[in-house]
Amino acid sequence: MNQQAPRPQSALEWFHYTRRQQQQQLQHLARLGEFATLISQLVHTLQRERGASNVWLCSRGELFGPQLQHSARQVDESLAAFQQWLTEHHALMNGNAAAKLACALWFLEGLSALREEIRILRITPEQAMERFNRTVQPLMEIIPEANDTLSDPQVAQALTALYSLMQGKEWVGQERAVGAIGFTRGEFDAALRQMLVDRIDAQQHSFATFLSLTEPEQAAMFRDSAEATRDIEQMRREACTRIPATPQSAARWFDIQTQRLDALRLIETRLIDTLSAVAQRSLQHTVDDAHPGETALAAWVVQQSSVKAAPVERHLLPLVRQQARELEKLSRELTSLQETLEERKTIDKAKSLLMNHQGISEELAWQQLRKLAMNQNQRMVDIARSLLLSASLWSVTPKR
């Protein structure tokens, strides 16, 4: 029978127990550093395939065919390395991380079906983008969830800086995908413009968090190579001011945003290296002082009980997870907004139909739709759809 370790009783014994727990956490994080690199690479290739898919779909298969095939191969290569690591190190996944992993793998397993729908143009760009988004988000959330008991403040700060940059990079990727839709189609409707603006706002919030936490070297690197360029700002203005776009605009937009994503990917790699280095330094410190005595305990108690010395960084992981939930909520709200705008378009078409065929005002047409909806206990948009579907059967000529 295995003998259990004696329960700590004195302050010094509890201190020793705390140090052992910290060592286990840091050793766990050190092993997960390689996994973070694999996740980063997989997410980056998925972001590329998402953007290329949107150009392909919006151009009805005329543009970005080779780019789409190349990006899909890169995803498959990254996914194979990701799955190989999981086979060898699955025991490192705790419950929360395993839940996120299960969600991510479920969407990844549906990639083949999604690609076939994209290939035969049987899916809209918006639908394809949403399915790619759902695949990427749980992948990114695996990293902080796999370290949910982390207590070292320096490591927590480095991890939060990394996660914030990854979130910002994902919003840049979504901005590229949204812009690809509008520029390839040659126009940005109200829903598409709103989606673009919301993703710009979201990435700025994530990058502000990153810059407040990261080391000066990485902050300088971001400002020099990864902020939105003048060309990006100009094309953003074109998208939001209804300037007619061309297929050449779509290619230019995709290229300059890809350059930005590649720069962010390089910073992301540096942050993973920084996180691993910080964890190794903290781990080495605990190993060097394997049997701390009363003096070390006294210093540690002073540090823990001091308000000024208690770093706020240890609370950053719960906050950044809350941020992730808020961003997910924003995505749902954007989807709802788009559906609302589409419903309004349908109602407006039905109103125009009534106005033309009955020679009535817009206000009266709206009242008729509203009355029909109330009498039949249906939503106005459902009445409008029925009206539009049956319009081809009408024999009534428009009133003059």
Image (spheres, rainbow, N blue to C red):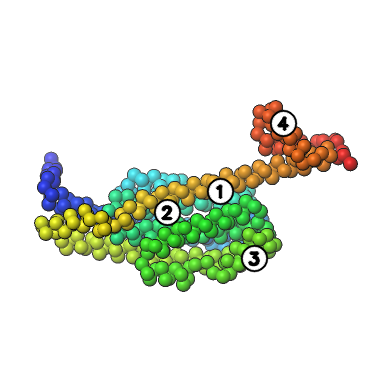
> Amino acid type of disc 4?
Lys
Q: Which residue is mark 1?
A: 334
Please tell me which residue is depicted at 24% across the width and 61% down the height of the picture. 282
**Disc on the earlier residue, 4 or 1:** 1
Camera-side mark, 2 or 1: 1
Amino acid type for the residue under numbered disc 2: Met
Q: Secondary structure at mark 3?
A: helix
Mark 4 crowdedness (10 Å alpha carbons): few <14, some 14-19, many ≥20:
few
Which tag, 2 or 1, sits closer to the chain's start?
A: 2
Which residue is nearer to you in this view: 174 or 41? 174
Query: Which element carries disc 1, helix, strand or loop?
Result: helix
Q: Quarter of the image holding residue 395?
A: top right
The residue labelled by disc 3 is: 249
Task: Assess disc 1: are there few (<14), some (14-19) or many (≥20) residues with their C-alpha within 10 Å of its C-alpha.
Answer: some
Q: Nearer the viewer, mark 4 or mark 1?
A: 4
Q: Secondary structure at mark 2?
A: helix
Q: Which residue is mark 2?
A: 140
* Residue 108 seen in the figure: no
Q: Which mark is residue 371?
A: 4
Answer with the quarter of the image where residue 96 lies: top left
| Mark in front: 2 vs 4 | 4
Mark 2 touching mark 1, by CB under 8 A? no
Q: Quadrant of the N terminus?
A: top left
